Amino acid sequence: MLMSIGPFAFDLVVNADTLGEEATEDFARKDIIGSRKPFEHVGAGDDRFTIRGALFPDHLGGGEAVRSLVALMRTGMPQLLLRGDGRLLGWVVMTSIRAEATHLDGRGRPGQVTFEIECMACDQPSAAGHLAALLSL
């Protein structure tokens, strides 16, 4: 396993080859007469993860992987993001999935599908919410 989002595991068939991370902090700014606006630290910002990869349905399979990921995203429930070496990256919600099918054969089937998944960090769901997400799959 290279990585997983909730129950969905990326492997050598559904290959996630890039993981991008963006960490941000939020600040409130207020107008002050005669000086620059000061920065008031208010906490963690909208941390983001971007997962990119490709699959080759004709050669390796995995043709339904993008649909499975979209179905998982449509639950709207937070999912645990885990790297293949066991490093816990935290809870995320998937906010968008883009896929591009290329190298179409004579029947319109793709030889390659590249995908990009955008996720935002979120708080851990309650136990009841997490169980409901698992049961909805």
Image (cartoon, rainbow, N blue to C red):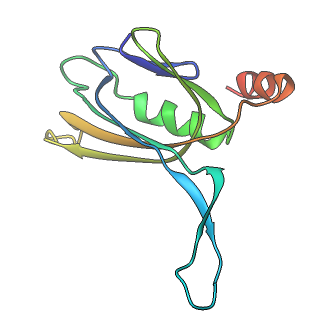
Which residue is nearer to you in this view: 49 or 12? Answer: 49
> Residue 37, position in %: x, y?
56, 78
- 35 vs 83: above or below: below
Which residue is nearer to you in this view: 14 or 51? Answer: 51
Task: State the residue lying farthest toward the right.
Answer: 128
Q: Which residue is at 76% across, 22% downward?
A: 135
Which residue is nearer to you in this view: 107 or 11? Answer: 11
Quarter of the figure that contains the N terminus: top left
Q: Which residue is at 59% across, 33% downward?
A: 72
Determine the image quadrant of residue 50.
Answer: top left
Quarter of the figure that contains the C terminus: top right
> Residue 42, position in %: x, y?
67, 55
- Say left or right for 52 vs 3: left
Task: State the residue lying farthest toward the bottom.
Answer: 33
> Residue 4, position in %: x, y?
47, 20
Determine the image quadrant of residue 93.
Answer: top right
- Say left or right for 137 vs 83: right
